[in-house]
C-alpha cells in the first residue's frame, strides 16, 4: 500500500539538538558536549515522567527545567542571561545534512511534523529552517507526550489520512516503536547505530539516514 503522508519527529530527527553544543561550550569551556548530552537526556526523561504522573508542562518549560538540572548536576553556573541564550538556540537548531535533499525527493506525499515540542518552540524553528510542511502538530493539544498512542492519533485527525497510509519517521528508537505500536509504518533513522530498544516490537524499516527513507 502506497503511503499518502510522511510524519516526522522533529528533535533529533530533522533538527540536531546537539547543535546547541557550541553555545554551551562558549559559556562552559571544556564542558559543552557533556552539558548538551545531559540536557537532552533529562529533557526526554522529564517528558516521560510528567506523562506518567499526569503533570503535563509545555516542552519549553520541560527544556528549561532539564537545563537547570543539568547545570546544577555538573556544577555549572547558570545565570538568567545564559538560560535565555541557551534556550534561544532551540529556535535555530541545525537541520541534519541529509534533510534538505531528502525533503526535495519526497514527491506526492503530504509531509508533517508530530513533535513533543510546544508551539512556542516549534513555530520559530520551522520558520527558521525553511522546510516545506503541510502541518506542524504538537502534543500540546493533548497535554501528554509521546509515545502515548493518542499522540500519534493527532496526525491521523489533522491530515485526514488513515493510519495504515502514514509513514512515521524518527531517529528515536522508542518513538519509532511507539508509532509502529499505534499502527503507522515506522522508519527508524539509526544515525547513532544504537541497538534496538527491547519493547516487544521493531520498526518496519531501519535506515542510516533520512535519504534512505523510500516510499
Image (tube, rainbow, N blue to C red):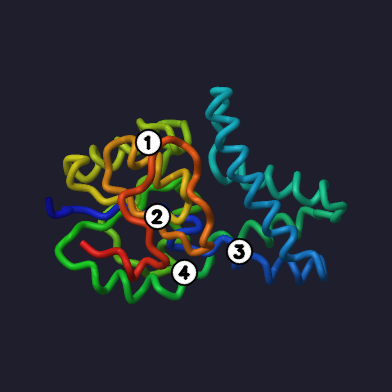
Asked if marks 2 and 3 touch (Cβ < 8 Å), the reply is no
Q: Quick check: 99 left or right of 57?
A: left
Q: Quick check: 114 left or right of 33?
A: left
Q: Quadrant of residue 141?
A: top left
Of residues 197 and 145, the one drawn nearer to the viewer in this rendering: 197
**Residue where numbered disc 4 is placed:** 95
At which x and y percent is residue 189?
42, 59
Seen at 45% across and 54% down, the residue is: 122
Mark with earlier residue (4, 1): 4
The C terminus - image quarter: bottom left
Categorize mark 2 by other alpha carbons within 10 Å: few (<14), some (14-19), many (20+): many
Q: Secondary structure at mark 4?
A: loop
Of residues 196 and 58, the one drawn nearer to the viewer in this rendering: 196
Q: Quick check: 30 left or right of 64?
A: right
Seen at 83% across and 52% down, the residue is: 74
Mark with earlier residue (3, 4): 3
Q: Mark 4 or mark 2: which is in front?
A: 2
Asked if marks 1 and 3 touch (Cβ < 8 Å), the reply is no
What distance separates the C-alpha of mark 3 from that of mark 4? Answer: 11 Å
**Residue where numbered disc 1 is placed:** 151
Asked if marks 1 and 2 touch (Cβ < 8 Å), the reply is no
**Residue where numbered disc 2 is placed:** 188
Asked if marks 4 and 1 touch (Cβ < 8 Å), the reply is no
At which x and y percent is residue 175?
44, 45
Amino acid at each position: 500500500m502506497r503511503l499518502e503522508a510522511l510524519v516526522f519527529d522533529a528533535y533529533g530527527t530533522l533538527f540536531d539538538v546537539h547543535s546547541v553544543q557550541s553555545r554551551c561550550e562558549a559559556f562552559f569551556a571544556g564542558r559543552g558536549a557533556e552539558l548538551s548530552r545531559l540536557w537532552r537526556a533529562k529533557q526526554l526523561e522529564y517528558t516521560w515522567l510528567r506523562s506518567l504522573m499526569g503533570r503535563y508542562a509545555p516542552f519549553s518549560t520541560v527544556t528549561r527545567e532539564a537545563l537547570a538540572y543539568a547545570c546544577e548536576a555538573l556544577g555549572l553556573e547558570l545565570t538568567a542571561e545564559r538560560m535565555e541564550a541557551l534556550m534561544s538556540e532551540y529556535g535555530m537548531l541545525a537541520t541534519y545534512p541529509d534533510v534538505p535533499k531528502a525533503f526535495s525527493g519526497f514527491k506526492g506525499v503530504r509531509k508533517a511534523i508530530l513533535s513533543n515540542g510546544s508551539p512556542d518552540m516549534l513555530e520559530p524553528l520551522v520558520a527558521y529552517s525553511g522546510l516545506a510542511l503541510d502541518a506542524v502538530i504538537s502534543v500540546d493539544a493533548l497535554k501528554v507526550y509521546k509515545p502515548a498512542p493518542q499522540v500519534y492519533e493527532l496526525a491521523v485527525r489533522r491530515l485526514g489520512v488513515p493510519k495504515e497510509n502514514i509513514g512515521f519517521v524518527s531517529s528515536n528508537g522508542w518513538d519509532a516503536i511507539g508509532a509502529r505500536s499505534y499502527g503507522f509504518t515506522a522508519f527508524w533513522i539509526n544515525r547513532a547505530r544504537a541497538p534496538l530498544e527491547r519493547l516487544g516490537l521493531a520498526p518496519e524499516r531501519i535506515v542510516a539516514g533520512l535519504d534512505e527513507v523510500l516510499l
